[in-house]
Image (tube, grey):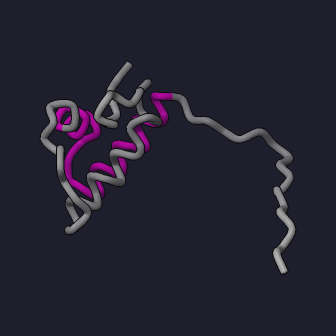
Amino acid sequence: MALPKHEPERSEPLYEPTYEEGMTILDGYTRRMLGISADEFLRRYDAGEYLGIGEDDAVGRGVVRCEMLIPVARPSRLDERGRIVPI
């Protein structure tokens, strides 16, 4: 017997951080997980230094987790290879 679908009611609208707040969030994650600033992480990411990195070790897992926060920190889109790039 399948359970009925239930969508929780929200009393307040979902909060979306500004890009400035998103950059602060990303900076906290990059410093904790990779030991570098968000600016340095984005510079390396944009330069392709993390291409092909996997989640086989702590650094790879940190890169992937931080990568997921890029759209919160700056306007972004996916390129033809599926990479997150700035708009």
Q: Residue 45, image x and y in percent?
A: 21, 37
Q: Residue 41, image x and y in percent?
A: 23, 40
| Relative vertical location of residue 72 with respect to residue 56 in this rendering, above or below | above
Total tally of numbered discs in the picture: 0
Q: Residue at x 29, y 49 (%)?
A: 30
33 in magenta: yes
Looking at the rendered image, the quarter that the N terminus falls into is bottom right
| Relative vertical location of residue 57 with respect to residue 65 in this rendering, above or below | below
Looking at the rendered image, the quarter that the C terminus falls into is top left
Q: Camera-side residue: 22 or 4?
A: 4
Left or right, residue 85 beside residue 69: left
Q: Residue at x 14, y 31 (%)?
A: 47
Q: Which residues are magenta?
A: 19-44
| Relative vertical location of residue 19 with respect to residue 50 in this rendering, above or below | above
**Which residue is outermost to the bottom?**
1
Q: Residue at x 28, y 57 (%)?
A: 62
Q: Residue at x 47, y 28 (%)?
A: 19
Left or right, residue 23 beside residue 58: right
Q: Residue 42, image x and y in percent?
A: 25, 35
**Which residue is outermost to the front?**
1
40 in magenta: yes
- In the figure, residue 79 lies in which quadrant? top left
Left or right, residue 39 beside residue 7: left
Q: Camera-side residue: 27 or 50?
A: 50
Q: Main secondary structure of the magenta part?
A: helix
